[in-house]
Image (tube, grey):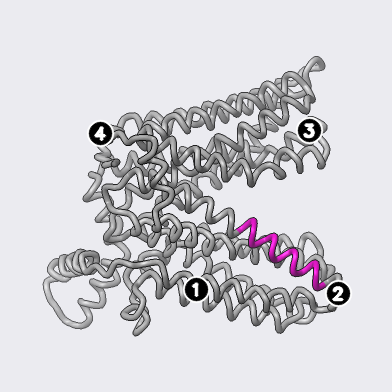
Amino acid sequence: MDIYKKQSLLETLSLYFEKRMARILLLGIIQGFPFVLIYTALTLWLRDNEFSRSQVGFISLIGVTYGFNWLWAPLVDRIRIPWLTNKIGHRRSWIVIMQLIILISLVLWGLNNPKENIWIVGLVGLTIAIASATQDIVTDALRIEQIGKTEGASMSAGAGVMVIGWFTGYKIGGMITLFIAHYLEELGIQNFWQITFLLLTIIIIACNIALMFVPEEHSTEKQIEQKKTDQFIVNKLGSSNSITNIFAWIIGTITGPFVSFFKSKGMKIGIYIIIFLFLFKIGEAFLGKMSIVFYDDMGFSKRDIAIYSKGYGYVITIVFTMVGSFFAIRSGLVKAMIIAGILMASTNLLFSALAWYGKSELLFATAVILDEMTAAISTVVFVAFISILVDRTYTATHYALMASLATFGKNVFSAFSGFVVDKLEFLNSPENLHNDWGIFFIITTLMVIPSLIFLWIIKDKLNLREQ
């Protein structure tokens, strides 16, 4: 059951002005900036060098790396970087190494021409994606560890600030990148993208300098608990020598996070949490995958889509990320999750109304903007929720696993979204050619119900402590 101490409005607002929130904002910026390199700069660089859309799309597959970072998250939790860990801490040493790899990668991009060395450019891009995905593991863990285990309110505030930091790194970093490239191109510099990449190393260096002001707790409790797991495995093996100790370390690294999760939550509750995480965002993903197709079918222009679906997105995300974070603090995380899920699903009905009403710019704008609002709220509440569920012994692994579960559920089931719409075409009539879309969006609304049922079942057994 939520143990929730009601705060005054002033106390809640003061959480966002704590020093650690500025540090969390920095971690979000560090996490968001590499996405500019992978999804914006690389794409435009290749297009400016006359690569086809198919070739650009193929290169963009390097982004799938982010969905699999949980595979090596246990290693990130256990392996200490020689010398550097003792100097600046476990988490910060990993971030610095990944930032160094990204910096070197930018230099390599700056020294190569994609027309001449596309494989080098692609491999360097893959290196950036792997380093960035690894960095995500560590920045999320360090963000969670900035906040006490029982500070649920601060965790919600931190989740909101982290999301804002990510969008700031991605959006503002993207603006800086594009402005530099545009200015250099206007000057008539032929290799303007290469010079842009070299100049962007300044941002990496600045972020690493700022990172040194993010404190990291040098606690031995985590290492002690991890070694207990190793010793338990050694005892089961019946002997202790160098080979069994190495084997126990490997098995403990891989299985320890799972054992810890189910031990702390219980097998039944743990399974219900996994099912909830897997199902929660599926309806939103179904809508997201087909939204542009729907807008096009309804006859909206690219300008309409750009203005309402993209143009207002950043401002809305920032504002309603804060609203969602504030709401989670004031109401408690479980209640906020349930309400956010209902709101997120309910806005899908506006798209059904649009399908049946017909083309209406007002209804279109209302549906898209409200959907952006509820998506921002549900995202930040979801981040706060899984952040407070992690076991601090395996912070990086637990967060990466739970976040990946949600991503995996979205990606697997949403792949069938177009198939579902096609199968609903028989519902169309001469009077309304979009009945298939109307029913489709009702289905996406109902998709949130199973996840909320599982959350309702376990809500009193989660033992979340929120202050």
Q: Using the numbered discs, state the Cα–Cα distance from disc 1 to disc 3 in whole angstroms.
A: 47 Å
- Label located before the other in sequence (1 or 3): 1
- Residue shown at 78%/81% (left/top)? 116
Where is residue 256 shown, x and y percent of the image? 27, 61
- Label located before the other in sequence (1 or 4): 4
- Label located before the other in sequence (3 or 2): 2
Residue bearing mark 3: 297
- Residue shown at 67%/61% (left/top)? 174
The residue carrying pointer 3 sits among few (fewer than 14), some (14 to 19) or many (20 or more) residues within 10 Å by Cα, namely some
- Label located before the other in sequence (2 or 4): 4
The span picked out in magenta is: 170-184
In the rendered image, which quarter is residue 294 located in? top right
Q: Using the numbered discs, state the Cα–Cα distance from disc 4 to disc 3 in whole angstroms.
A: 46 Å
Q: Nearer the viewer, mark 2 or mark 4?
A: 2
Q: Using the numbered discs, state the Cα–Cα distance from disc 2 to disc 1 in whole angstroms.
A: 31 Å
Q: Nearer the viewer, mark 1 or mark 3?
A: 1
Residue situated in front as seen by the camera: 308 or 396: 308
Name the side, left or right, on which 88 lies relative to 448. Answer: left
Q: Which mark is residue 187?
A: 2
Residue situated in front as seen by the camera: 466 or 393: 466
Proximity of marks 2 and 1: CB atoms separated by less than 8 Å: no
- Label located before the other in sequence (4 or 3): 4
Q: Main secondary structure of the magenta part?
A: helix
Q: Is residue 179 magenta?
A: yes
Q: Secondary structure at mark 1?
A: helix
Q: Which mark is residue 208?
A: 1
Q: Is residue 314 magenta?
A: no
- Residue shown at 64%/25% (left/top)? 350
Q: Secondary structure at mark 4?
A: loop
Q: Amino acid at mark 1?
A: Asn
Q: Nearer the viewer, mark 1 or mark 4?
A: 1
